[in-house]
Amino acid sequence: MASNQPGGAQIDLTQLPIPQLQELKTQLDRELEHLTTSFQSLRTAQTKFRDCLNSISLGVNTSALEKPLLVPLTSSLYVPGRLTDSEHVIVDVGTGFFVEKSTADATDFYERKVKDLGASLKDLESVINGKANNVRMVEEVIRVKVLSSQGQEGQEKKAG
């Protein structure tokens, strides 16, 4: 059995002692946890961009002009406001920068973000699956080694 290492080299897991295998498993578990957290963060960002698309398509139109509405400043703080222009919106383009865009340009911007994040999520999912397979391989080698060492101890007790 071989495992891919970051440098591309392969090692024979069956040749490693149990403590090294356990250390390798711990490292892989940490990497897997980090990747899973990143995956969830990307999924959350993609959902927020989809929400922005829905807001533009449902909330920014001429029928909403001058009607009172609540404007989100944070996820839990809203202030009263009014829509004064149904053709332009302010878009958060990242790191605290906001740009005025037409609703068509804003929709295109958010659709590209959703698409790009979808591609990143797909790539990250394959990396996560690979890491999970590596963890399972290491666990199996550990299990086999522990069982064989227990079997050898039992043989020695019978012989002695």
Image (cartoon, helix red, strand yellow):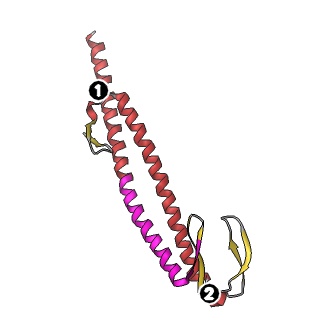
The image quarter containing residue 137 is: top left
Q: Nearer the viewer, residue 68 or 103?
A: 103
Q: Is residue 117 magenta?
A: yes
The residue that label 2 is drawn on is: 86
Residue that appears at 65% across and 90% down: 63
State yes or no: discs 1 and 2 in contact (Cβ < 8 Å).
no
The span picked out in magenta is: 98-127
Residue 66: percent from left, percent from top: 71, 87
Does 7 sit above or below residue 74? above
Amino acid found under the numbered disc labelled 1: Ser
Does 132 sit above or below residue 76? above
Q: Nearer the viewer, residue 153 or 135?
A: 135
134 left or right of 106 in image: left
The residue that label 1 is drawn on is: 148
What distance separates the C-alpha of mark 1 from that of mark 2? 72 Å
62 left or right of 66 in image: left
Q: Would you say the magenta stretch is mainly helix, strand or loop?
A: helix
Q: Nearer the viewer, residue 22 or 160?
A: 22
The image quarter containing residue 96 is: bottom right
